[in-house]
Amino acid sequence: MDKRIKQLRRLLKESGIESLIIDGAENRFYLSGFTGTAGRILFTPDHNYFITDFRYVEQAEKQLEGYEIIKINKGLEKKLSKLLHREGVSKLCFEAEAVNYKQYEKYKKALTGIQLEAVTGLISKLRIKKDREEISRIKTAAAVTDLAFTHILDFIKPGCTEREVALELEFFMKKQGAERNAFDFIVASGKRSSLPHGVASDKVIRDGDFITMDFGCFYNGYCSDMTRTIVVGKPTKKQRDIYNIVLKAQQEVKKRVKAGMLCKDVDAIARDIITEKGYGSRFGHGLGHGIGVEVHEEPRVSYTSDTVLEDGMVITDEPGIYIPEWGGVRIEDDLLITEDGCEVLNDSPLELISV
């Protein structure tokens, strides 16, 4: 964590930021490795403080390096005021994404004489590229997801519900060591597979249904995110045709993506293929997104993004076609961007599987 603290301090200096408080859980974990649920990080000109209550002091002492641990019983804002005034801090920056209006009002009331300023996307500049340890954790999370997909193929039968499939995926992954789900799993069958975010319902799975399963897990603080679409019974010609269009788009991205490309140009690889086949209007979301300590983080791989991909970024590749009242297909893998291409982190089969 010392390396990340040094990187952040350089960024603070470059940005002219005197002091910064970290309220968001993801950034707190990224900068400290702390896995508890309560605590703030405060960077002042001279100190790195970790502020928490008696429930987490012992845990913080074991998990943290490079921080002075401050125990509070109550009155976080009062303690902040004392620390900041003691060091002569005149302005405190806070994370715009993590501080709600109620908390902002508490800071404003308690920190008299100290200017408050919201900053956006500061830590994400550090998080956007993954180091060796982060990549290792994401790979493990992806491997657990692959195992879960193999397992669920034997579980799915006509008559079971989408919710039962989602629960079985969750139970299996936790048995493999996953901490928790990366998000609410999407299990959408039949006509519901046209819903890009069709969270698992009580719908009964029937013969002939497409089933789109979008799922992932957290492992040691880092997540995976994979989607596969399968069919129950024998697929129709239209099901095969739609599936193969999406698969071609997804595979072409893997062949051509590399560091130095604009995200919008990567999106266009898949989008142009789907559009050429007449389904451009049925691919309404971006191609993908970054993953790490959050399942959706920078970079955004969409048709509007001018972000340049760099070696060490991890993104999803997930084109789809969604046809209302018929169904849909999405296929997704996690990709580690390299100088000359990408490394695919998932190992689950990509051909259309019938169960």
Image (cartoon, rainbow, N blue to C red):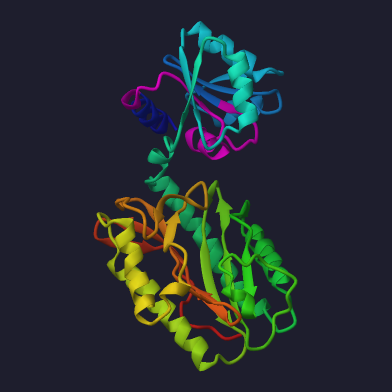
Q: Quadrant of the C terminus?
A: bottom right
Depth check: give the residue in front, 214 or 319. 319
Left-right relation of 116 to 340:
right
Residue 201 drawn at (x, y percent): 71, 69
Depth check: give the residue in front, 255 or 16. 16
- Specify the farthest residue to the front: 281
> Residue at image x 37%, y 57%?
336
Residue 334 lies in the magenta-colored region: no
Q: Quadrant of the N terminus?
A: top left
Depth check: give the residue in front, 4 or 197. 197
Q: Is 48 placed above or below 4 here?
A: above
> Residue at image x 59%, y 22%?
51
Residue 172 drawn at (x, y percent): 66, 64
Q: Which image quadrant for residue 178? A: bottom right
Q: Is 160 placed above or below 83 here?
A: below
Report how many numbered discs are placed on residues in the image.
0
> Residue at image x 71%, y 84%?
158
Residue 130 drawn at (x, y percent): 39, 47
Residue 21 drawn at (x, y percent): 51, 25
The span picked out in magenta is 13-40
Q: Is 248 placed above or below 225 here?
A: below
Residue 29 lies in the magenta-colored region: yes
> Residue at image x 68%, y 17%?
75
